[in-house]
Image (cartoon, rainbow, N blue to C red):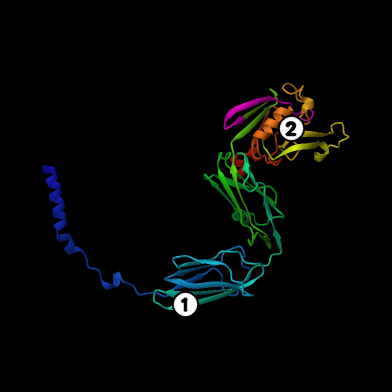
Amino acid sequence: MGVTLLVAGLLAAGCTSTAAESEAPSASPSSSTSQPRPVLLALSVSDDQDGVEPGQSVTVRAEHGTITEASLIGTHGTHVKDDLRSTGTFWTTTEPLGYGKTYTLTVEAEGEDGETVTEESTFTTATPQRTVGVSVNVWDDETVGVGMPLIFTFTGAVPDRDAAEEALAVTAEPETEGDFRWFGDSSVIWRPKTYWQAGTEVSIDAEIYGKDLGDGTYGAQDKSVEFDIGEKVVAVADGETHELTVSVGDEDERTMPISMGKPSSPTPHGTYTVMSEHNGYTMDSSTYGVPIDNAEGYRLYVDYAVRLSHSGIFYHSAPWSVGDQGHTNVSHGCINLSLADAAWLMDKSKRGDVFRVTGSGGPELEPTDGWSVWQLSWEEWQA
């Protein structure tokens, strides 16, 4: 009780002390108020400017005042859609401009001093020497595997790679670390640092229209895709045991006998990514340079086939080799399965799933052969 009284007494003494109050300087009129200032406007385009990127927003910022009215009008009276933020200090266009067009930006604003200011700027957008489009290897609303790389393929060479990457936005929930790597002048791939997390929702916004991609090259059209990462499915084919083990969600679900490439045509070893699935497919050796009438040539119809590489590696149904599956490698490089096992695996898997080959006795899989981006470590990918 005595301590309580002491604390209360100290508080009371602090509240009633006049010494500190008497030492505090009084505020002068000049320090508490300032003169109203005229509005300052910052336009993102200047008068008579040429070569403005049609894909970049035209903006106006106001300081010491607010924008009361703004518009961007084309030569033929076209009114560009815009947005004036609720604070009145920022205005922006909300749609792209046309190539080789002339526009006039008119802005009216009122300053703190109550004075109205009007500014105007007439400019012309760029006329490209050439345009390029872009496609991506995933489809809208698709569910893909945890190994799926995002491949952006331009219709022509891209001189300024940094500008192209800035125009390609990959957004994931949950947030996923990843990076770009170029394969040639017209293809760039974005992959995550590690496999995607199952259930991730991904959006791609390739906003290339009107963007300067270097040397007179501009983007032709934007591309947007939304897709999901499905259940984790990983298949491991072992050329020594002649078995394929399939895990779902990191739990082994099924093991099945296989036959891989024979000694004269061994299956490259490494980590593949499922590229496409086919119900009914003709395996044709001439598609990768071996004529059908060659001793090693062939043309065979199969019920189930899943492409793993550009060079012609598939896993597929092969009823003719069931007697060898489980103990002998006899194929031309593909992974042979029974009809039932191939049907089950194809039903379970999807584009973007991971397929690893070990113990095949073949060469190492090239990172450029198919979607085999996991052949590179993260450090190699970023190098």
Residue 191 location (% of width, % of height) = 61, 44
Callout 1 crowding tier (Cα within 10 Å): few <14, some 14–19, many ≥20: some
Q: Is residue 345 above or below residue 224?
A: above
- Please state, as top left, top right, bottom left or bottom right, where the N terminus lies in the image: top left
Label 1 vs label 2, nearer the camera: 2
Residue 329 location (% of width, % of height) = 75, 25
**Foreground residue, 155 or 48?**
155
Q: Is residue 261 part of the magenta span, yes or no?
A: yes
- Which badge, 1 or 2, is on the more N-terminal residue? 1
**Foreground residue, 176 or 182?**
176
Residue 71 location (% of width, % of height) = 54, 72
Q: Is residue 267 part of the magenta span, yes or no?
A: no
Quarter residue 252 falls in: top right
The answer to whether residue 310 of the structure is visible from this angle is yes
Residue 297 location (% of width, % of height) = 84, 33
Give the SS element for disc 1: strand
Q: Which residues are magenta?
A: 247-265
Q: Is residue 331 above or below residue 23?
A: above
- Please state, as top left, top right, bottom left or bottom right, where the C terminus lies in the image: top right
The answer to whether residue 262 of the structure is visible from this angle is no
Specify the amino acid type for callout 1: Val
Quarter residue 363 falls in: top right
Q: From this viewpoint, which residue is outermost toward the left?
A: 2
Q: Which residue is denoted by mark 2 in the rendering?
A: 316
Q: Is residue 225 left or right of residue 333?
A: left
Q: Which residue is denoted by mark 1 in the rendering?
A: 117
Q: From this viewpoint, which residue is outermost toward the right?
A: 293
Point 56% across, 70% down: residue: 45
Q: Is residue 187 left or right of residue 56?
A: right
